[in-house]
Amino acid sequence: MTTGQIPDGFVSLFRSSPFLESVGNFYFVGLGADMRIGVFVEPRATNLRGLAHGGFLSALCDVALGYALSTSQTPTARLVTASLTVEFAGSAKVSDWVETSVDIQHLGRAMGFASAYPHVGRKRIVHASGVFARSAEREP
């Protein structure tokens, strides 16, 4: 269920998971540090107060951070989340478009570091910092 107009340039996320599909339809534009991921808040992603659930927003941050870091080089880096710190500064309600920008600090041979800033309109609602480890495992 899409609850509004998807912003110009955004297309369905190129890779998903059963979990992501259970909480929303995710979209992206750009790659690497220019990647932005967006999603409409649907009732299935809310808490009892009708606001975007903290776990939903945390998952959005995790995906935005990992995908931006991964696509910041060619070939793409295989990464797994080592640490995710999330601080909530606001909220989003059903039908809000939440868009996440990412600031990549460093992607080295073993670890990557980045921050994510989900926002509704111009209002930042979350700050997240992530640390990602390179994975030797092959992706499915």
Image (cartoon, rainbow, N blue to C red):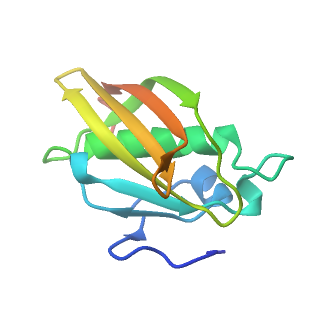
**Horizontal arrangement in the rendering, residue 68 relative to residue 84 (left or right):** left
Task: Look at the image and tell me whether residue 123 can be seen.
Answer: yes
**Horizontal arrangement in the rendering, residue 32 relative to residue 45 (left or right):** left
- The foreground one among 49 and 26 is 49
Q: Residue at x 53, y 61 (%)?
A: 39
**Horizontal arrangement in the rendering, residue 132 relative to residue 27 (left or right):** left
Q: Position of residue 95 (x, y in %)?
A: 66, 67
- The foreground one among 31 and 49 is 49
**Horizontal arrangement in the rendering, residue 48 relative to residue 64 (left or right):** right
Q: Position of residue 19 (x, y in %)?
A: 62, 50
Task: Look at the image and tell me whether residue 139 can be seen.
Answer: no
Single out the residue that lies furthest toward the front.
Answer: 122
Q: Residue at x 33, y 34 (%)?
A: 79
Q: Position of residue 82 (x, y in %)?
A: 43, 22
Q: Residue at x 15, y 44 (%)?
A: 73
Callout count:
0
- Asked which quadrant contains residue 138, the reply is top left
